[in-house]
Image (cartoon, rainbow, N blue to C red):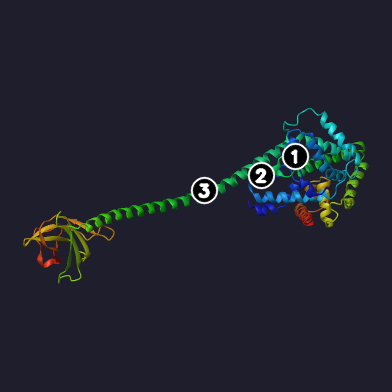
Amino acid sequence: MDPKEYISSGKLEEYVLGLGSSESMQEVECMARVFPEVKVEILALQITLEKNIMETQVAPPPHLKKQILDTIDQLPNEVTTPSPAIPTGSAPAVKKGKWFSGLIALLLLLLATLSVLNFRKNQQLTAELDNYKSEQLELNKNAEELNRMLEVRKHELRLLRDPGMAAITLTGTPLSPASLAKVYWGKTNQEVYLEVHQLPAPPSGKQYQLWGIVQGKPVDLGIFDIPAPSDSALIKMKDVQGVTTFAVTLEPTGGNPDPTLDQMYVAGNVQ
Amino acid sequence: MNYNDIQNLPYDLVQKIKSGEKKSFELLYDQYAPALYGIILKILQQDTASAQDSLQDSFVKIWKNIAAFDESKGSIFTWMLTIARRTALDKLDSIRNKKIQNLDSPVNITQNQFHTHSSIDGIGVNELVNRLQPDHQILISLAYFQGYTQEEIAQKLNMPLGTVKTKTRAAMQELRNRIK
Protein backbone atom coordinates (compact mmCIF):
# COMPACT_ATOMS: atom_id res chain seq x y z
CA MET A 1 0.00 0.00 0.00
CA ASP A 2 1.35 3.39 -0.99
CA PRO A 3 0.94 5.85 1.91
CA LYS A 4 0.80 8.82 -0.50
CA GLU A 5 -2.09 7.27 -2.35
CA TYR A 6 -3.77 6.50 0.96
CA ILE A 7 -3.38 10.09 2.14
CA SER A 8 -5.14 11.39 -0.95
CA SER A 9 -7.91 8.77 -0.78
CA GLY A 10 -10.14 10.99 1.35
CA LYS A 11 -10.27 8.40 4.13
CA LEU A 12 -8.24 10.55 6.50
CA GLU A 13 -10.68 13.44 6.14
CA GLU A 14 -13.58 11.06 6.83
CA TYR A 15 -11.72 9.81 9.88
CA VAL A 16 -11.00 13.24 11.28
CA LEU A 17 -14.52 14.45 10.66
CA GLY A 18 -15.87 11.28 12.24
CA LEU A 19 -17.78 10.23 9.13
CA GLY A 20 -16.46 6.74 8.48
CA SER A 21 -17.64 3.43 9.84
CA SER A 22 -15.85 1.79 12.76
CA GLU A 23 -14.15 -0.46 10.24
CA SER A 24 -12.65 2.39 8.30
CA MET A 25 -11.72 4.13 11.57
CA GLN A 26 -9.76 1.07 12.62
CA GLU A 27 -8.18 0.88 9.21
CA VAL A 28 -7.01 4.49 9.36
CA GLU A 29 -5.59 3.99 12.85
CA CYS A 30 -3.68 0.91 11.68
CA MET A 31 -2.31 2.81 8.70
CA ALA A 32 -1.29 5.68 10.98
CA ARG A 33 0.65 3.24 13.10
CA VAL A 34 2.41 1.71 10.10
CA PHE A 35 3.13 4.89 8.10
CA PRO A 36 4.38 8.00 9.93
CA GLU A 37 3.40 10.24 7.01
CA VAL A 38 -0.23 9.14 7.41
CA LYS A 39 -0.06 10.01 11.07
CA VAL A 40 1.39 13.45 10.33
CA GLU A 41 -1.43 14.12 7.86
CA ILE A 42 -4.06 13.07 10.40
CA LEU A 43 -2.61 15.39 13.02
CA ALA A 44 -2.58 18.26 10.52
CA LEU A 45 -6.23 17.62 9.67
CA GLN A 46 -7.16 17.41 13.36
CA ILE A 47 -5.47 20.75 13.99
CA THR A 48 -7.34 22.20 11.02
CA LEU A 49 -10.63 21.15 12.54
CA GLU A 50 -9.65 22.28 16.03
CA LYS A 51 -8.58 25.73 14.86
CA ASN A 52 -11.73 26.23 12.82
CA ILE A 53 -13.94 25.14 15.68
CA MET A 54 -12.06 27.42 18.08
CA GLU A 55 -13.36 30.33 16.03
CA THR A 56 -16.96 29.65 16.94
CA GLN A 57 -16.97 29.49 20.72
CA VAL A 58 -20.07 30.19 22.78
CA ALA A 59 -19.77 30.60 26.54
CA PRO A 60 -22.09 28.15 28.31
CA PRO A 61 -24.26 29.58 31.10
CA PRO A 62 -22.13 29.90 34.27
CA HIS A 63 -24.34 27.66 36.42
CA LEU A 64 -23.64 24.71 34.10
CA LYS A 65 -20.06 24.28 35.32
CA LYS A 66 -21.14 23.80 38.95
CA GLN A 67 -23.92 21.49 37.86
CA ILE A 68 -21.47 19.31 35.94
CA LEU A 69 -18.93 19.25 38.77
CA ASP A 70 -21.70 18.28 41.21
CA THR A 71 -22.80 15.45 38.93
CA ILE A 72 -19.24 14.18 38.81
CA ASP A 73 -18.90 14.41 42.59
CA GLN A 74 -21.92 12.16 42.97
CA LEU A 75 -20.50 9.52 40.66
CA PRO A 76 -19.18 6.36 42.28
CA ASN A 77 -15.40 6.49 42.44
CA GLU A 78 -14.51 4.62 39.30
CA VAL A 79 -12.39 7.05 37.39
CA THR A 80 -9.17 5.12 37.59
CA THR A 81 -10.64 1.95 36.10
CA PRO A 82 -10.53 2.32 32.37
CA SER A 83 -13.94 1.93 30.85
CA PRO A 84 -14.40 0.76 27.29
CA ALA A 85 -13.09 3.36 24.93
CA ILE A 86 -15.48 5.63 23.18
CA PRO A 87 -14.58 4.92 19.61
CA THR A 88 -13.08 8.06 18.14
CA GLY A 89 -15.96 9.50 16.21
CA SER A 90 -17.42 6.28 14.96
CA ALA A 91 -20.74 6.22 13.19
CA PRO A 92 -23.55 4.49 15.09
CA ALA A 93 -25.53 1.45 14.07
CA VAL A 94 -22.75 -0.56 12.50
CA LYS A 95 -23.24 -4.24 13.24
CA LYS A 96 -20.65 -5.71 15.53
CA GLY A 97 -20.02 -8.79 13.38
CA LYS A 98 -19.32 -6.69 10.34
CA TRP A 99 -17.06 -4.47 12.35
CA PHE A 100 -15.17 -7.40 13.71
CA SER A 101 -14.71 -9.28 10.47
CA GLY A 102 -13.65 -6.05 8.83
CA LEU A 103 -11.03 -5.56 11.48
CA ILE A 104 -9.78 -9.11 11.09
CA ALA A 105 -9.63 -8.69 7.31
CA LEU A 106 -7.73 -5.47 7.70
CA LEU A 107 -5.28 -6.97 10.17
CA LEU A 108 -4.72 -9.90 7.84
CA LEU A 109 -4.13 -7.50 4.96
CA LEU A 110 -1.68 -5.51 7.02
CA LEU A 111 0.02 -8.65 8.20
CA ALA A 112 0.32 -9.88 4.62
CA THR A 113 1.68 -6.53 3.44
CA LEU A 114 4.19 -6.44 6.25
CA SER A 115 5.17 -10.05 5.59
CA VAL A 116 5.84 -9.32 1.94
CA LEU A 117 7.85 -6.22 2.81
CA ASN A 118 9.69 -8.17 5.46
CA PHE A 119 10.35 -11.06 3.12
CA ARG A 120 11.75 -8.76 0.44
CA LYS A 121 13.91 -6.95 2.93
CA ASN A 122 15.08 -10.25 4.30
CA GLN A 123 16.01 -11.55 0.86
CA GLN A 124 17.91 -8.40 0.14
CA LEU A 125 19.77 -8.57 3.45
CA THR A 126 20.59 -12.25 2.96
CA ALA A 127 22.07 -11.50 -0.47
CA GLU A 128 24.08 -8.64 1.00
CA LEU A 129 25.26 -10.85 3.82
CA ASP A 130 26.37 -13.55 1.35
CA ASN A 131 28.33 -10.93 -0.56
CA TYR A 132 30.01 -9.77 2.58
CA LYS A 133 30.76 -13.34 3.60
CA SER A 134 32.47 -14.19 0.30
CA GLU A 135 34.33 -10.88 0.40
CA GLN A 136 35.45 -11.69 3.91
CA LEU A 137 36.54 -15.16 2.82
CA GLU A 138 38.52 -13.67 -0.05
CA LEU A 139 40.17 -11.16 2.27
CA ASN A 140 41.04 -13.89 4.76
CA LYS A 141 42.60 -15.94 1.98
CA ASN A 142 44.60 -12.97 0.81
CA ALA A 143 45.76 -12.24 4.32
CA GLU A 144 46.85 -15.85 4.84
CA GLU A 145 48.72 -15.81 1.56
CA LEU A 146 50.45 -12.56 2.47
CA ASN A 147 51.39 -13.94 5.88
CA ARG A 148 52.83 -17.06 4.32
CA MET A 149 54.85 -15.03 1.82
CA LEU A 150 56.04 -12.75 4.59
CA GLU A 151 57.30 -15.74 6.58
CA VAL A 152 59.10 -17.07 3.51
CA ARG A 153 60.72 -13.72 2.80
CA LYS A 154 61.76 -13.33 6.43
CA HIS A 155 63.40 -16.71 6.26
CA GLU A 156 65.15 -15.80 3.02
CA LEU A 157 66.30 -12.51 4.49
CA ARG A 158 67.78 -14.34 7.48
CA LEU A 159 69.68 -16.64 5.15
CA LEU A 160 70.98 -13.84 2.95
CA ARG A 161 72.10 -11.78 5.93
CA ASP A 162 74.12 -14.68 7.28
CA PRO A 163 77.76 -13.51 6.93
CA GLY A 164 78.85 -17.08 6.17
CA MET A 165 76.57 -17.23 3.14
CA ALA A 166 78.23 -16.79 -0.26
CA ALA A 167 76.25 -15.59 -3.25
CA ILE A 168 77.29 -17.09 -6.57
CA THR A 169 75.80 -15.81 -9.83
CA LEU A 170 75.20 -18.49 -12.46
CA THR A 171 75.19 -16.90 -15.91
CA GLY A 172 73.79 -18.27 -19.17
CA THR A 173 75.91 -20.58 -21.37
CA PRO A 174 76.03 -20.19 -25.19
CA LEU A 175 73.12 -22.67 -25.27
CA SER A 176 70.93 -20.16 -23.40
CA PRO A 177 72.71 -16.81 -22.97
CA ALA A 178 69.73 -15.05 -21.38
CA SER A 179 69.46 -17.57 -18.54
CA LEU A 180 70.42 -16.48 -15.06
CA ALA A 181 70.36 -18.03 -11.58
CA LYS A 182 71.91 -17.48 -8.18
CA VAL A 183 73.15 -19.93 -5.57
CA TYR A 184 73.53 -19.07 -1.91
CA TRP A 185 75.93 -21.41 -0.26
CA GLY A 186 76.78 -21.57 3.42
CA LYS A 187 80.48 -22.34 3.49
CA THR A 188 80.28 -23.30 7.15
CA ASN A 189 76.90 -25.06 7.28
CA GLN A 190 77.05 -26.42 3.71
CA GLU A 191 73.47 -25.37 2.96
CA VAL A 192 72.61 -24.59 -0.65
CA TYR A 193 69.75 -22.39 -1.86
CA LEU A 194 68.99 -21.80 -5.52
CA GLU A 195 67.28 -18.69 -6.87
CA VAL A 196 66.08 -18.92 -10.48
CA HIS A 197 66.00 -15.58 -12.27
CA GLN A 198 65.61 -16.71 -15.83
CA LEU A 199 65.42 -20.23 -17.28
CA PRO A 200 63.36 -21.47 -20.23
CA ALA A 201 60.43 -23.68 -19.29
CA PRO A 202 61.66 -27.29 -19.61
CA PRO A 203 60.11 -29.45 -22.36
CA SER A 204 57.93 -32.32 -21.15
CA GLY A 205 59.90 -35.27 -19.84
CA LYS A 206 62.77 -33.03 -18.80
CA GLN A 207 63.78 -31.41 -15.50
CA TYR A 208 66.57 -29.09 -14.42
CA GLN A 209 69.27 -30.45 -12.11
CA LEU A 210 71.85 -28.53 -10.03
CA TRP A 211 75.42 -29.72 -9.83
CA GLY A 212 78.35 -28.77 -7.69
CA ILE A 213 81.90 -29.39 -8.93
CA VAL A 214 83.87 -30.71 -6.02
CA GLN A 215 87.52 -31.46 -6.68
CA GLY A 216 86.85 -31.59 -10.45
CA LYS A 217 83.91 -34.00 -10.16
CA PRO A 218 80.21 -33.16 -10.55
CA VAL A 219 78.09 -33.83 -7.43
CA ASP A 220 74.30 -34.05 -7.73
CA LEU A 221 72.68 -31.28 -5.67
CA GLY A 222 69.10 -32.21 -6.62
CA ILE A 223 66.49 -31.64 -9.30
CA PHE A 224 64.11 -28.65 -9.23
CA ASP A 225 61.14 -27.13 -10.99
CA ILE A 226 61.00 -23.46 -11.91
CA PRO A 227 59.04 -21.95 -9.02
CA ALA A 228 55.79 -20.08 -9.62
CA PRO A 229 56.16 -16.31 -8.98
CA SER A 230 54.17 -16.49 -5.72
CA ASP A 231 56.28 -19.31 -4.31
CA SER A 232 59.47 -18.99 -2.41
CA ALA A 233 62.24 -17.56 -4.53
CA LEU A 234 64.80 -19.75 -2.79
CA ILE A 235 64.80 -23.49 -3.43
CA LYS A 236 66.60 -25.57 -0.81
CA MET A 237 68.98 -27.98 -2.49
CA LYS A 238 71.26 -30.70 -1.11
CA ASP A 239 74.09 -29.69 1.25
CA VAL A 240 77.56 -29.72 -0.16
CA GLN A 241 81.15 -29.03 0.93
CA GLY A 242 84.15 -27.66 -0.97
CA VAL A 243 82.45 -26.58 -4.15
CA THR A 244 84.32 -24.58 -6.78
CA THR A 245 81.59 -24.31 -9.44
CA PHE A 246 77.77 -24.57 -9.59
CA ALA A 247 75.98 -25.51 -12.81
CA VAL A 248 72.43 -26.35 -13.99
CA THR A 249 71.74 -28.91 -16.72
CA LEU A 250 68.57 -30.13 -18.36
CA GLU A 251 68.08 -33.82 -17.62
CA PRO A 252 65.39 -36.49 -18.03
CA THR A 253 62.66 -36.19 -15.38
CA GLY A 254 63.90 -37.53 -12.06
CA GLY A 255 67.47 -36.49 -12.69
CA ASN A 256 70.68 -38.10 -13.90
CA PRO A 257 73.60 -39.65 -11.98
CA ASP A 258 75.94 -37.70 -14.28
CA PRO A 259 75.35 -34.34 -15.91
CA THR A 260 74.62 -34.10 -19.64
CA LEU A 261 77.23 -31.47 -20.32
CA ASP A 262 75.89 -30.26 -23.69
CA GLN A 263 72.65 -29.42 -21.88
CA MET A 264 74.23 -26.96 -19.42
CA TYR A 265 72.15 -23.80 -19.15
CA VAL A 266 73.87 -21.75 -16.45
CA ALA A 267 77.10 -21.98 -14.50
CA GLY A 268 79.13 -19.88 -12.05
CA ASN A 269 82.36 -20.14 -10.08
CA VAL A 270 82.71 -19.69 -6.36
CA GLN A 271 84.95 -16.64 -5.72
CA MET B 1 -9.30 31.70 24.55
CA ASN B 2 -7.59 31.12 21.23
CA TYR B 3 -5.98 28.08 19.79
CA ASN B 4 -2.45 28.93 20.85
CA ASP B 5 -3.43 29.41 24.50
CA ILE B 6 -4.77 25.91 24.52
CA GLN B 7 -1.46 24.60 23.29
CA ASN B 8 -0.01 26.02 26.51
CA LEU B 9 -2.04 23.82 28.84
CA PRO B 10 0.03 22.10 31.53
CA TYR B 11 1.65 19.13 29.85
CA ASP B 12 0.54 16.82 32.65
CA LEU B 13 -3.07 18.08 32.80
CA VAL B 14 -4.47 14.88 31.31
CA GLN B 15 -2.29 12.78 33.58
CA LYS B 16 -3.62 14.64 36.60
CA ILE B 17 -7.22 14.18 35.49
CA LYS B 18 -6.53 10.49 34.89
CA SER B 19 -5.39 10.22 38.49
CA GLY B 20 -8.73 11.75 39.56
CA GLU B 21 -7.70 15.34 40.22
CA LYS B 22 -10.87 17.46 39.94
CA LYS B 23 -9.07 20.82 39.94
CA SER B 24 -7.39 19.86 36.69
CA PHE B 25 -10.72 18.74 35.28
CA GLU B 26 -12.15 22.18 36.09
CA LEU B 27 -9.27 23.73 34.19
CA LEU B 28 -10.06 21.48 31.25
CA TYR B 29 -13.68 22.61 31.40
CA ASP B 30 -12.73 26.30 31.48
CA GLN B 31 -10.49 25.88 28.46
CA TYR B 32 -12.71 23.81 26.22
CA ALA B 33 -16.36 24.15 27.27
CA PRO B 34 -17.03 27.24 25.10
CA ALA B 35 -15.70 25.57 21.94
CA LEU B 36 -17.63 22.37 22.65
CA TYR B 37 -20.78 24.31 23.50
CA GLY B 38 -20.47 26.20 20.21
CA ILE B 39 -20.36 22.93 18.26
CA ILE B 40 -23.18 21.36 20.25
CA LEU B 41 -25.41 24.40 19.71
CA LYS B 42 -24.86 24.14 15.98
CA ILE B 43 -25.65 20.46 15.87
CA LEU B 44 -28.81 20.99 17.90
CA GLN B 45 -29.77 24.02 15.83
CA GLN B 46 -29.50 26.51 18.69
CA ASP B 47 -31.83 24.53 21.00
CA THR B 48 -30.14 25.75 24.21
CA ALA B 49 -31.89 23.38 26.65
CA SER B 50 -30.84 20.30 24.66
CA ALA B 51 -27.40 21.80 24.10
CA GLN B 52 -26.82 22.30 27.82
CA ASP B 53 -27.93 18.73 28.50
CA SER B 54 -25.53 17.52 25.85
CA LEU B 55 -22.63 19.58 27.16
CA GLN B 56 -23.20 18.15 30.63
CA ASP B 57 -23.45 14.60 29.28
CA SER B 58 -20.29 15.18 27.28
CA PHE B 59 -18.23 16.34 30.26
CA VAL B 60 -19.49 13.50 32.42
CA LYS B 61 -18.43 11.06 29.69
CA ILE B 62 -15.08 12.81 29.40
CA TRP B 63 -14.52 12.43 33.14
CA LYS B 64 -15.63 8.79 33.19
CA ASN B 65 -13.65 7.79 30.12
CA ILE B 66 -10.51 9.85 30.51
CA ALA B 67 -8.51 6.66 31.13
CA ALA B 68 -9.37 5.55 27.60
CA PHE B 69 -7.98 8.71 26.04
CA ASP B 70 -5.00 7.75 23.90
CA GLU B 71 -2.61 10.61 23.24
CA SER B 72 -1.05 8.78 20.34
CA LYS B 73 -4.26 9.15 18.32
CA GLY B 74 -4.59 12.89 18.66
CA SER B 75 -4.96 15.78 21.07
CA ILE B 76 -7.27 15.87 24.07
CA PHE B 77 -9.32 18.51 22.25
CA THR B 78 -9.88 16.23 19.27
CA TRP B 79 -10.96 13.48 21.62
CA MET B 80 -13.36 15.73 23.54
CA LEU B 81 -14.70 17.12 20.29
CA THR B 82 -15.53 13.60 19.14
CA ILE B 83 -17.40 12.88 22.35
CA ALA B 84 -19.30 16.17 22.28
CA ARG B 85 -20.27 15.82 18.63
CA ARG B 86 -21.39 12.21 19.14
CA THR B 87 -23.41 13.14 22.21
CA ALA B 88 -25.12 16.02 20.45
CA LEU B 89 -25.84 13.92 17.35
CA ASP B 90 -27.40 11.22 19.54
CA LYS B 91 -29.53 13.93 21.13
CA LEU B 92 -30.52 15.17 17.67
CA ASP B 93 -31.47 11.61 16.70
CA SER B 94 -33.65 11.16 19.77
CA ILE B 95 -35.36 14.51 19.14
CA ARG B 96 -36.06 13.51 15.52
CA ASN B 97 -37.34 10.09 16.58
CA LYS B 98 -39.59 11.60 19.22
CA LYS B 99 -41.10 13.86 16.63
CA ILE B 100 -41.77 10.91 14.34
CA GLN B 101 -43.22 8.81 17.18
CA ASN B 102 -45.47 11.57 18.44
CA LEU B 103 -46.72 12.55 15.04
CA ASP B 104 -46.78 9.39 13.06
CA SER B 105 -49.45 10.20 10.50
CA PRO B 106 -48.20 10.10 6.90
CA VAL B 107 -48.70 13.84 6.57
CA ASN B 108 -46.47 14.58 9.53
CA ILE B 109 -43.73 12.27 8.36
CA THR B 110 -43.75 14.15 5.09
CA GLN B 111 -43.52 17.35 7.06
CA ASN B 112 -40.60 15.99 9.03
CA GLN B 113 -38.81 15.10 5.84
CA PHE B 114 -39.49 18.58 4.59
CA HIS B 115 -37.97 19.93 7.80
CA THR B 116 -34.83 17.93 7.27
CA HIS B 117 -34.64 19.25 3.79
CA SER B 118 -35.13 22.84 4.85
CA SER B 119 -32.26 22.55 7.29
CA ILE B 120 -29.98 21.98 4.32
CA ASP B 121 -31.08 25.32 2.95
CA GLY B 122 -30.41 27.02 6.28
CA ILE B 123 -26.81 25.95 6.41
CA GLY B 124 -25.46 29.46 6.01
CA VAL B 125 -25.93 30.09 9.73
CA ASN B 126 -22.87 28.01 10.58
CA GLU B 127 -20.07 30.54 10.86
CA LEU B 128 -17.57 27.72 10.91
CA VAL B 129 -18.20 26.92 7.30
CA ASN B 130 -19.87 29.97 5.88
CA ARG B 131 -16.70 31.20 4.29
CA LEU B 132 -16.32 27.96 2.36
CA GLN B 133 -17.57 27.65 -1.17
CA PRO B 134 -21.27 26.71 -1.17
CA ASP B 135 -21.06 23.02 -2.12
CA HIS B 136 -18.37 22.49 0.51
CA GLN B 137 -20.53 24.24 3.12
CA ILE B 138 -23.40 21.88 2.43
CA LEU B 139 -21.21 18.78 2.68
CA ILE B 140 -19.51 19.74 5.92
CA SER B 141 -22.81 20.78 7.47
CA LEU B 142 -24.61 17.60 6.53
CA ALA B 143 -21.75 15.35 7.51
CA TYR B 144 -20.23 17.01 10.53
CA PHE B 145 -23.12 18.92 12.06
CA GLN B 146 -26.03 16.73 11.06
CA GLY B 147 -24.31 13.38 11.28
CA TYR B 148 -25.37 12.03 7.91
CA THR B 149 -23.27 9.26 6.46
CA GLN B 150 -21.67 9.94 3.11
CA GLU B 151 -24.03 7.41 1.50
CA GLU B 152 -27.00 9.33 2.89
CA ILE B 153 -25.54 12.60 1.67
CA ALA B 154 -24.99 11.13 -1.78
CA GLN B 155 -28.67 10.12 -1.83
CA LYS B 156 -29.89 13.44 -0.46
CA LEU B 157 -27.91 15.54 -2.90
CA ASN B 158 -28.40 13.10 -5.75
CA MET B 159 -24.64 12.94 -6.23
CA PRO B 160 -22.36 9.93 -6.81
CA LEU B 161 -20.73 8.69 -3.60
CA GLY B 162 -17.27 9.22 -5.12
CA THR B 163 -18.06 12.88 -5.74
CA VAL B 164 -19.23 13.30 -2.13
CA LYS B 165 -15.93 11.86 -0.93
CA THR B 166 -13.82 13.98 -3.26
CA LYS B 167 -15.70 17.13 -2.27
CA THR B 168 -15.40 16.31 1.43
CA ARG B 169 -11.67 16.09 1.02
CA ALA B 170 -11.60 19.36 -0.93
CA ALA B 171 -13.67 21.00 1.82
CA MET B 172 -11.14 19.96 4.44
CA GLN B 173 -8.34 21.29 2.26
CA GLU B 174 -10.20 24.58 1.99
CA LEU B 175 -10.56 24.76 5.78
CA ARG B 176 -6.89 23.96 6.03
CA ASN B 177 -5.90 26.77 3.70
CA ARG B 178 -8.08 29.18 5.67
CA ILE B 179 -6.13 28.71 8.90
CA LYS B 180 -2.70 29.01 7.29
Q: Are marks 1 and 2 on the same chain?
A: no
Q: Are marks 3 and 2 on the same chain?
A: yes
Mark 3 nearby-residue class (10 Å; few <14, some 14–19, many ≥20): few
Is residue B155 at least partly visible in the picture? no
Residue B80 coordinates in the image, percent (x, y): 78, 41
Give yes or no for contact between labels 3 and 2 (Cβ–Cβ under 8 Å).
Answer: no
Instruction: Using the numbered discs, state the Cα–Cα distance from disc 3 to disc 2 in whole angstroms.
Output: 23 Å
Find disc 1 in the rendering and name its residue.
B13
Instruction: Using the numbered discs, state the Cα–Cα distance from disc 1 to disc 3 in whole angstroms.
Output: 44 Å
Direction top: furthest residue? A76
Give me the disc on residue A122. 3
Direction left: furthest residue? A216
Mark 1 nearby-residue class (10 Å; few <14, some 14–19, many ≥20): some
Quadrant of the image occupied by residue B33: top right
- Label 3 is placed on what type of residue? Asn
Q: Earlier in the sequence, mark 3 or mark 2?
A: 2
Is residue A76 at least partly visible in the picture? yes
Instruction: Using the numbered discs, state the Cα–Cα distance from disc 1 to disc 2 in whole angstroms.
Output: 27 Å
Find disc 2 in the rendering and name its residue.
A30
Give me the disc on residue A112. none
> Residue visible at 83% across and 36% down?
B57
The front one of B122 and B107 is: B122
Viewer-side label of 1, 2: 1
Q: Would residue B60 appear left or right of A230 to someone viewing this image?
A: right
Residue A98 coordinates in the image, percent (x, y): 70, 39
Mark 2 nearby-residue class (10 Å; few <14, some 14–19, many ≥20): some
> Residue visible at 85% across and 37% down?
B56
- Tell me the SS state at disc 1: helix
